[in-house]
Amino acid sequence: MASFYRIFTLMFMLLIFSISSATAQVDIEPASEITKETFQQRVDTGDLLLVNFVGPGCKNCKEFAPIFNRVNTELLRESSEVKAVVVNDMETVRRFDIRKIPSVVLFRKSIPILYEGHNEAEEIFEWIGESKKVQGRYLNDDDFEHLTQASTGSTTGDWLVQFCDPERPQCEALIASWEAVAYRLKGKVNVATVDISKNPNLVKRFSVAIERTPYVVFIKDEKLYKLHRKMIYAPSIQLENFMSVGYTESRVFKVPKERTFFDDLTESIANKLKDTQASVPGLFVIIVVCLVVFSLVLCKVFCGGSSSRGFSSKGPKKGV
């Protein structure tokens, strides 16, 4: 009987040792490092990619590596669709305007979101679960006013809107931090983007200068507040403070009304007249004179006609 207990105890200890060894092996599973070319290919395919951006000779990156490896381990254990990788390329870091390394960025459908929490595996893993869905919205000429109700007394809440051209490096660099802003302000402020290359009516309505993009406005209670360039690139916590109280210290503008067909027509006529004046100055004067004469003739016809109907050429009739 005693030998049976010894054998059982020995087998149990071997089992515990095997489990511990297997766990230890999984716990040290490192995330694979990929080249910037491979990284871009996987981003373009829309993969759910968790990237640890590091740099050569970075001491903090080496200290963070075991934490990121723990996150990678947990993703592998759960057979998650999110794959963790390491990218060691400063050109890519600068492209996404990443201010410090190491930095963790989650790409979903090619859209990145920057992690701004503590360097703790559990917190990062929880953040991944909450960030799989793209937070920011995209507005266009057709649905902007309907969704924001910007100039009609909004009942859909406050809006933080970025006007940007995705082809401009300044705009591309803002994408990761902009999604982080949308994540932080979720449930408080609606965060959206307008692609100015596809929405000319909104560009005209808000007088957006392409060379000054990204251009960001905060819309609240039919009022518009323009964000300073430094504020646009500020950490999301500073933007959150601006949305709460900081906007009250900024200059306030009236939200421009939605453009109508008549607005576009008159602007088109004005532009054509300007072009005519520039090419043939004398012709412009002739056109203006003709318009004035035509207006006077119309006035004479209608006003004169009504006057002639009011009196007889023979004078008023005598009473009975």
Image (spheres, rainbow, N blue to C red):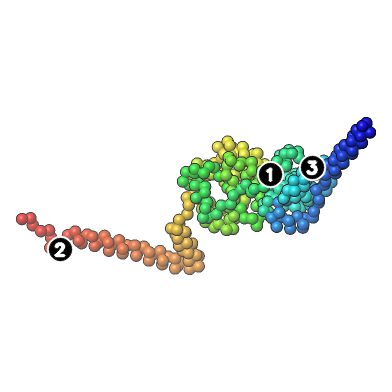
Foreground label between 2 and 1: 1
In this view of the protein, which residue sits in the foreground, 47 or 208? 47
Q: Is residue 264 visible?
A: yes
Q: Earlier in the sequence, mark 2 or mark 3?
A: 3
Write the residue at 22% across / 59% down: 307
Write the residue at 59% across / 55% down: 195
Q: Residue furthest front?
A: 1
In this view of the protein, which residue sits in the foreground, 268 or 280? 268
- Residue type marked 2: Ser
Q: Height in image: 172 above or below 14?
A: below
Q: Which residue is mark 3?
A: 70
Q: Which residue is mark 1?
A: 129
Q: Is residue 229 visible?
A: no
Q: Position of residue 198 (x, y in %)?
A: 57, 58
In this rendering, position of residue 11 left or right of residue 289: right
In this rendering, position of residue 129 left or right of residue 206: right
Q: Residues within 10 Å of mark 1 (few under 14, many from 20)?
A: few
Distance between the alpha carbons at the discs numbered 2 and 3:
105 Å
Write the residue at 94% across / 33% down: 3
Q: Residues within 10 Å of mark 2 (few under 14, many from 20)?
A: few
Distance between the alpha carbons at the discs numbered 2 and 1:
92 Å
Q: Position of residue 96 (x, y in %)?
A: 71, 50
Q: Position of residue 175 (x, y in %)?
A: 66, 50
Q: Quadrant of the C terminus?
A: bottom left
Q: Quadrant of the N terminus?
A: top right
Q: Earlier in the sequence, mark 1 or mark 3?
A: 3
- At mark 3, the secondary structure is helix
Write the residue at 59% across / 58% down: 197
Q: Residue furthest top?
A: 2
Q: Earlier in the sequence, mark 2 or mark 1?
A: 1
Q: Which residue is mark 2?
A: 313
